Image: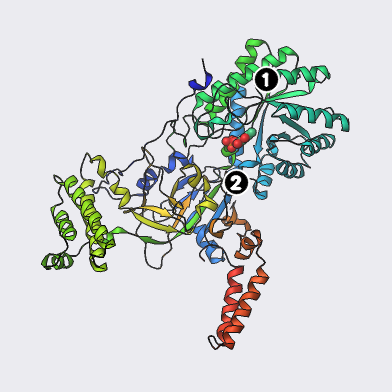
Amino acid sequence: TDAESSATPVAARPPASRPAPATPAEPWTVRDASDLFQVDGWGQGFFAVNDKGRVVVRPDRTPGREVDLYEVVAGLEERGIQPPVLLAFNDLLATRINDIHQAFGNAIKENSYQGRYHAVYPIKANQQFHLVNQVMQSGQPFDVGLEAGSKPELLAVLGLTADGRDRLIICNGFKEERYIRHVMLATKLGRTIIPVIENTRELDLILEQAEAYGVRPRIGVRVNLGVRGAGRWRHSSGSKAKFGLTIPSVLQVVDKLRQRDMFDCLQLVHCHMGSQIHDIRVVTSGVTELARLYVELIRLGAGLKYIDIGGGLGIDYDGSQTNYEFSTNYTLSEYAGNVVYRIMATCDDAGVPHPHIVTEGGRAMVSHHSVLVFNVVGAHRLDDYKLPTSLENGVAKRTDVPRPLEDLLEAYRNVSQARMLECYHDASQAREEALTLFKFGHLTLEDRAMVDRLFWATCLKMHHILRDMEAVPEELEKLEYRLSDTYFVNLSIFQSLPDIWAIDQVFPILPIHRLDEEPTREGTLADLTCDSDGKIDHFVDRQAVRRTLRLHELRDGEPYYLAAFLVGAYQETLGDLHNLFGDTNVVHVKMDEQWGWSIEQVVEGDTVKEVLGYLQYDVNQLYQAIRHDCERSVRAGRMTIAESRTMLSAYEGGLSGYTYLE
Ligand code: PLP
């Protein structure tokens, strides 16, 4: 049978078009807020809502030992550090590393497993220096290693492991001669470094370079498993996988190593079944297949010591613990238990000693530790289209009302549960006709405005009735979404949350304060870019992904902050400079026994000058061009000298400023 066809299908959680109706009798509590946004589900004890209605971070899950996010952001604003800001909690990262080790440690103990466990952090998940450095520090008690997927990553990894010779370094990705040379020389430095062969040509390069430098290398081999992964990255294994050797190619490697009397150098077998594996059955099946390969290679005489199951340990982004692609239907301890048990059982059956187990989970290690906080800069709401009686009567009294406007007024007045669909059809038809009339010059601008007003007022009237109806006609299901507010946020999705744009990823997003008040609005989020794709309209919900987010009314002169959680992996470094919005400020926050929390480090975001520099602008030349223009304007009498000075200092200030709204 075709192994690929046995892969479990991706379980799509259907979008929810309607929120669960509120229960007006019960007063709103912070517990309701926590339930609404599923904080306990995805928060995993690291995040909670406190009695003041604010989101708190508990880096080691201890209630009370917590950081109030609103307090942090307000404190940062006072210090002149503005949102959007990425808050990194290094204590939380340490807890995650500890959790992963504990899960494997427990599984090893429970199964009396004979090998050790090595976590290796693939820096591709987030290569920021402070983060990788922190992984090295927090991972010291467990000898956490590093994985490089490219030559630049390898050079960073080599520099970071100078004091950690025992840390395992796994080298994946495409390798040319220079890459391999770095590996051989690092072996001479005494590093525990394993280049993983991804194609047969790489073996020849390794053999050449090993001979040239007189090194007896450790070698790994990446196999392309028959089992296919699950979710977005399912093609990382299976017949069309980009990386990894087929079984016949593995045997060619075996032959070549044997011929050179170097079979003992083959120390590791590796696979990567894809990122964010949401179904435990894929893990079980892949690990069993890899373990079978391990024991077969041992039978042939390989000197294998390690079995490396790659990355893929998933994150429950929506807290639903389901087989949905942005959730996981397993826990960390179930994952560790399964991996250890499957390898053990396969080795025991073949009478082979248990290998050391290596994992390359990146997302699982670093996602939780950073939180992106951003402010709302305004909102657009269709409520503004509500129709005052005076306007309605005004239209009705006119003698020259164009036909579509008359039809719309009729539809507006007739809205009722029984005639819901009919009114919707009439209103839509009338609006379309009105637009045509406007295009051909038969409708004034004022009447065109009245048409829009009446149309949305009709939809709003329907919306109120729909809320109390059990079954909503299919055609009207999207009304909730169309009528929702748009909250404009000080953020670029392309820079800070690129996976929302690229793969429709769902991250938990919610207000970080005012959660003791019921959020009464429904909204989607629009970012600062002028791209219509720069929006967020998929949110975590109790039963399904929902298209709108419950939000609070904005209050004049009062900031309103939202945050996206679990954003520590693959976001910052995949982000781009769309519309020249640069890196955000990053602030490392740590628990402080005396003060509760303190700022450990501030990495300032890009200035306008910096992002222009990335794109080869000569900022001095730009400034000089403005200076000349000012001079010409002063001479022509269009500008005073004082105004020209203001212009120049504003331009200079702008160049040195933050790329986001300040
Ligand atoms: N190892 C390899 C070879 C990978 O390609 C990747 C990701 O693409 C990882 C590890 C990390 O995967 P994850 O972050 O899902 O654990």
Q: Rounded to the nearest whole Å, what is the CA distance between mark 2 and mark 1?
A: 31 Å
Can residue 169 be seen by looking at this rendering?
Answer: yes
Q: Is residue 518 above or below residue 238?
A: below
Label 1 sits on what residue type? Gln
User: Where residue 300 sits in the image (x, y, percent)?
Assistant: 73, 13
**Sequence-first tag of 2 and 1:** 2
Q: How is the image coloured?
A: rainbow
Q: In the rendered structure, which amino acid carries the disc numbered 2? A: Asp
Judged left or right of residue 120, residue 545 is left
Residue that appears at 21% across and 49% down: 424
Q: Is mark 1 within 8 Å of ligand 1?
A: no
Q: Position of residue 195 (x, y in %)?
A: 74, 31
* Quadrant position of residue 184: top right
Q: Is residue 257 left or right of residue 485?
A: right
Which residue has dot 1 on it? 114
Residue 634: percent from the left, percent from the top? 58, 86
**Residue in front for this viewpoint, 130 or 526:** 526
Indicate the secondary structure of the residue bearing disc 2: helix
Question: What residue lies at 64% left-to-right and 47% top-to-bottom?
Answer: 131
Residue drawn at point x = 58 percent, y = 67 percent: 657
Task: Give the residue furthest to the front.
Answer: 440
Q: Is residue 17 left or right of residue 184?
A: left
Q: Nearer the viewer, residue 330 or 221?
A: 221
Q: Is residue 55 left or right of residue 254?
A: left
Task: Check disc 1 and report its element: helix, strand or loop.
Answer: loop
- Give the image quarter of residue 594: bottom right
Circle 2 is placed at which residue position?
A: 91
How crowded is the residue under tag 2: few (<14 C-alpha within 10 Å), some, or many (20+)?
A: some
What label sits on residue 594 in the rendered view? none
Asked if ligand 1 lies within 8 A of label 2, the reply is no
Image height of 83 relative to 115, above or below: below
Please say whether residue 641 is visible from this viewpoint. Answer: no
